[in-house]
Amino acid sequence: MSLQHPVTTAELIYQVGQLEGQIIQRRLADIGIRMDHARLLHYVSDVAGTNQANLAEYLNVQPATLTNMIKKLEKQNLIIRRVNPINSHMKQIFLLPEGEKAAHKINEVFNQLNRIVASVQLTDVAQFQQLLARLEAKYKD
């Protein structure tokens, strides 16, 4: 016997977010990019020369966590930090050519997901369920 329980909007939002994360991880596995690194590269591709404070705020991470992320991406030759010519105490972050290639793929994945999300009118629970179903149909194995 199966027990039915009401599906809340918050639960559906959570499920959609989890599924989007899985989709992104799967689509980016071939370039070895994790979700948090994908978001960093995506932001830097849109805001070239951003500083670490703005990036930490966007990613909602502590400065030490961001520094570790940046070091890993630097070792992969995806980004570079440069001293800000106006304020030598600040570092700016730029994509290297390999980072630009990775960011292009990341942007494609994000844009594809955004198109799917935008295709559903999210005004009630049934429409969130429709969005989840569309994402599952497109990306589940």
Image (cartoon, rainbow, N blue to C red):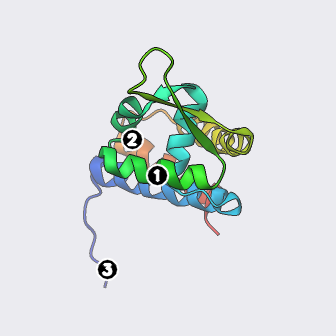
The three-letter code of the residue at mark 3 reads: Ser
The residue under label 1 is 69
Question: Where 67 falls versus 141 (above or below)?
Answer: above
- Find residue 31 and report its horizontal and vertical position in percent: 69, 58
Q: What label does residue 54 carry, if any? A: none
Residue found at x 60% / y 42%: 79
Circle 2 or circle 3, nearest the eye:
2
The residue under label 2 is 59
Label 2 with label 3: CB-CB less than 8 Å: no
Q: Quadrant of the N terminus?
A: bottom left
Q: Is residue 110 left or right of residue 21?
A: right
Label 2 with label 1: CB-CB less than 8 Å: yes
The residue under label 3 is 2
Residue found at x 65% / y 62%: 29
Q: CA distance from mark 1 to mark 3?
A: 44 Å
Task: Identify which residue, 16 or 96, lies in the foreground.
Answer: 96
- Residue that sits furthest to the front in the current view: 88
- Find residue 103 and report its horizontal and vertical position in percent: 66, 40
Task: Identify which residue, 135 or 71, lies in the foreground.
Answer: 71
Circle 1 or circle 3, nearest the eye:
1
The three-letter code of the residue at mark 2 reads: Leu
- Find residue 121 and report its horizontal and vertical position in percent: 48, 32
- Find residue 27 and report its horizontal and vertical position in percent: 66, 57
